[in-house]
Image (cartoon, coloured by chain):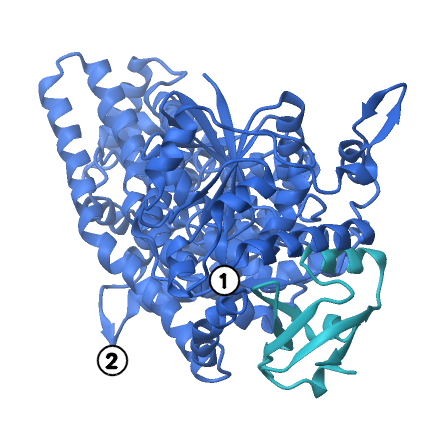
């Protein structure tokens, strides 16, 4: 599922992470791994960024990076 | 003296706690071998180090890797740590704690933001948590000191305990009945192989942490609304129109405030040094001592201290933006724009800091995850208009244009803004070029944590302002003081005899009976500085400069802020009172043309030279330390000197 289909305030679960090992490691350090529950907060069009809540913190990722995270809406 | 470190994730309230414990008994320190900027302070005979925040021992950014090295050193020496957890992000923060617990370092855990926990009705069973972690746990609010007494008692009795291990057993191997601490070995090894976290390790930690948190929090669902207020604010602050307008308005306000509020204290400092110089000349009978104090030491010191109000105000305002949580929003807003120049929102803080001083700005570039972007910021940052350029700009603009208004705008203020904009454009273009050309692999990793909005903790803002301003005064002061002394010597002594100079003076007086010839000016012309200025005159003549300007240029190569002090020495002003320097500069005549020496073309040329030239030895030294060799600062110096020369030449020819 693409993040574009995820609306503000909706929650999802991470089912796979694409990309390089460095990228996967970077997400792990930021608390995003398989099974992590994310909530989409906002993604202003001018910024090309998406802000999510993960582990009680508000984290912004680039839309292109977030597209490498496979998610399922819950 | 025993020592311990404060360790925690970014935004855990570590620095507030450090300020509470140490008060003003703290200083910014660098660790040997790396420019890790940490604060070191004293509490009841213990030395405390506040290490930069770290997300994980597997983090990739440079400052976090250096913090990791420091934590490993603490593990080796079994020195204790005070681990600070953000109570509202307990699970997230405990991940780092679990990694450190596996290093078996004696620890006391501080659960911070007790007030937020109470507000959100999150109730901890603290004793149960202490039992699960295996070390003392203190609940406190580092913003107002609630819980500090209990922590002080634990620190006084040195009640640090080695915590229970989380996943250490996954790594530890036994050989001949002895434990090989291979968890630590794996962390040390991870330095070289990209510091990858093992997913199994991560999941196991999450599982253990999850079970601990569920067992100690009465109702874990309560804290879900904690971020809601910040999200509501973000609807405004990150709005495509209002958000960007607010950002521009904030920047305008910061600059206006820096100039508006600094004027009066700057005038006081200026007058104080002028009075001291006057007092010295009147009351010190020994001419040599009076000269070295009033023409060397006092102008040099005044040249540093006059910037203090502007720098302090800028650091104060940047502190408010940072501690309120808005600075991260600026990074968010500017990310897309900066990406066109090979930068990202992570570069905003170093770039904005460089308006105060390039040195902390270059050091703060360590927080940038991508090495290529970091290099682009380090290389381009010195082109941003730092506070040391301000006096140069101020005096040249004052010589160039009268203090008049054009509509609602002050023309001098508009010109100053134009110079700042040229600095920003030059920085962005240079960063774009470096990010395209530099042969550094890009990690292409980026994320930005948005902390919750808070009313700034004034104690922290003021401490931060005090420490950074103090560091500027001491660092810049040392160089300026030495340069002022050298310049005073070069301008006061001559390879020619006194009789020879007197003879030359008399000849000039006889040859120009209509003119008033200054004896001091003739002395200067035949001084070492005068000869030096004349030596470089052919090279700077195409820019419209004479040998006197050459002396000021040479003297300000170590630190550009020396320029005004040098001019005041060269033109025999003897004080830094602006109107006196101004009058002298305006009255200087070009002997070749008979026109004003500081005409529009020369002033534009000088301003452009100072916009581009890298005249700061401290910046070069910091760049060398941050990049590990002299190659980058030397290239930087040469490139910026060429840019300065070319633009100054064009400016002189056009006007």
**Residue B323, percent across and down?**
40, 56
Q: Is residue B52 left or right of residue B58?
A: left
* In front: label 2 or label 1: 1
**Residue B159, percent across and down?**
48, 27
Disc assigned to residue B407: 2
The one nearer the camera, B307 or B605, is B307
Residue wearing tag 1: B451
Q: Which chain can be seen in cyan?
A: A
The one nearer the camera, B626 or B491, is B626
Q: Is residue B406 left or right of residue B65?
A: left
Q: Is residue B483 above or below residue A51?
A: above
Disc assigned to residue B468: none
Outermost residue on the right side: it is B176
Q: Chain of mark 2?
A: B
- What is the display colour for chain B? blue
> In which quadrant of the rendered view does residue B295 lie?
top left
Q: Is residue B319 above or below residue B326?
A: above
Residue B272 in view (yes/no): yes
> In which quadrant of the rendered view does residue B335 lie?
bottom right
Question: What element does badge 2 sit on?
Answer: loop
Callout 1 crowding tier (Cα within 10 Å): few <14, some 14–19, many ≥20:
many
**Residue visible at 37% across and 61% down?**
B600
Give me the C-alpha separation between circle 2 and circle 1.
42 Å
**Residue B65, percent across and down?**
67, 41
Q: Earlier in the sequence, mark 2 or mark 1?
A: 2
Q: Is residue A54 above or below residue B156?
A: below
**Residue B5, percent across and down?**
52, 32
> In the picture, which quadrant includes the C terminus of chain B?
bottom left
């Amino acid at each position: 599922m693409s993040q574009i289909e995820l609306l503000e305030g909706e929650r999802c679960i991470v089912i796979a992470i694409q990309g390089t090992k460095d990228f996967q490691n970077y997400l792990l350090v930021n608390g995003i791994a398989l099974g992590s529950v994310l909530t989409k907060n906002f993604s202003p069009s001018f910024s090309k960024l998406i802000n999510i809540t993960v582990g009680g913190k508000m984290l912004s990722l680039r839309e292109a990076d977030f597209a490498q995270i496979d998610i399922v809406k819950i | 003296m025993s020592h311990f470190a404060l360790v925690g994730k970014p935004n855990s309230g570590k620095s507030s706690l450090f300020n509470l414990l140490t008060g003003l008994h703290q200083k910014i320190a660098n660790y040997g071998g790396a420019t890790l900027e940490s604060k070191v302070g004293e509490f009841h005979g213990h030395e405390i180090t506040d290490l930069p925040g770290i997300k994980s021992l597997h983090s990739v950014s440079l400052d976090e890797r250096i913090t990791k090295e420091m934590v490993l050193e603490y593990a080796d020496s079994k020195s204790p740590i005070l681990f600070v957890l953000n109570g509202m992000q307990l699970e997230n923060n405990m991940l780092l704690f679990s990694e450190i617990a596996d290093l078996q370092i004696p620890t006391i855990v501080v659960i911070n933001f007790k007030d937020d926990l109470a507000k959100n009705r999150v109730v901890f069973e603290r004793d149960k948590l202490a039992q699960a972690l295996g070390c003392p746990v203190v609940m406190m609010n580092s913003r107002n000191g609630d819980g500090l007494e209990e922590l002080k008692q634990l620190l006084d009795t040195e009640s640090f305990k080695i915590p229970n291990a989380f996943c250490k057993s996954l790594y530890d191997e036994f050989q001949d009945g002895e434990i090989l601490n291979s968890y630590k070995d794996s962390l040390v090894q991870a330095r070289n192989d990209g510091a990858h976290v093992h997913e199994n390790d991560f999941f196991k930690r999450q599982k253990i942490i999850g079970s601990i948190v569920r067992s100690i929090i009465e109702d874990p669902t309560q804290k879900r609304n904690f971020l809601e207020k910040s999200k509501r604010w973000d609807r405004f602050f990150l709005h495509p129109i209002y958000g960007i307008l607010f950002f521009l308005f904030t920047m305008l306000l910061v600059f206006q405030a820096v100039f508006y509020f600094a004027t009066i204290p700057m005038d006081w400092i200026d007058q104080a040094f002028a009075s001291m110089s006057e007092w010295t000349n009147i009351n010190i009978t020994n001419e040599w001592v009076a000269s070295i104090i009033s023409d060397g030491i006092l102008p040099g010191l005044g040249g540093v201290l006059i910037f203090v109000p502007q720098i302090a105000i800028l650091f104060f305002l940047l502190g408010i933006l940072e501690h309120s949580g808005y600075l991260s929003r600026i990074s968010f807003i500017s990310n897309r724009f900066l990406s066109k120049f090979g930068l990202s929102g992570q570069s905003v803080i170093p770039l904005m800091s460089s308006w105060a001083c390039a040195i902390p700005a270059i050091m703060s570039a360590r927080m940038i995850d991508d090495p290529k972007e970091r290099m682009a910021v380090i290389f381009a940052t010195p082109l941003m208009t730092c506070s040391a350029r301000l006096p140069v700009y101020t005096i040249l603009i004052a010589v160039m244009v009268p203090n008049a208004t054009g509509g609602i705008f002050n023309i001098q203020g508009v010109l100053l803004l134009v110079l700042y904009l040229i600095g920003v454009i030059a920085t962005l273009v240079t960063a774009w070029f470096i990010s395209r050309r530099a042969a550094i692999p890009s990690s292409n990793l980026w994320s930005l944590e948005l902390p919750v909005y808070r009313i700034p903790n004034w104690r922290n803002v003021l401490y931060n302002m005090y420490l950074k301003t103090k560091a500027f005064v001491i660092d810049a002061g040392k160089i300026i003081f030495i340069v002022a002394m050298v310049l005073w010597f070069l301008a006061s002594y001559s390879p020619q005899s006194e009789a020879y100079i007197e003879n030359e003076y008399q000849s000039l007086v006889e040859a120009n009976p209509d003119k008033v010839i200054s004896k001091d000016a003739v002395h200067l012309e035949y001084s070492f500085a005068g000869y030096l200025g004349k030596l470089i005159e052919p090279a700077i003549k195409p820019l419209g400069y004479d040998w006197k300007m050459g002396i000021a240029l040479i003297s300000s190569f170590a630190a550009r802020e020396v320029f005004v002090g040098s001019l005041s020495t060269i033109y025999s002003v003897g004080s830094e009172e602006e109107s006196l320097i101004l009058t002298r500069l305006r009255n200087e005549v070009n002997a070749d043309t008979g026109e004003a020496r500081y005409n529009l073309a020369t002033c534009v040329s000088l301003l452009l030279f100072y916009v581009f030239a890298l005249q700061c030895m401290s910046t070069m030294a910091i760049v060398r330390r941050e990049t590990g060799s002299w190659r980058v600062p030397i290239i930087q110096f040469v490139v910026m000197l060429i840019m300065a020369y070319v633009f100054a030449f064009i400016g002189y020819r056009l006007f």
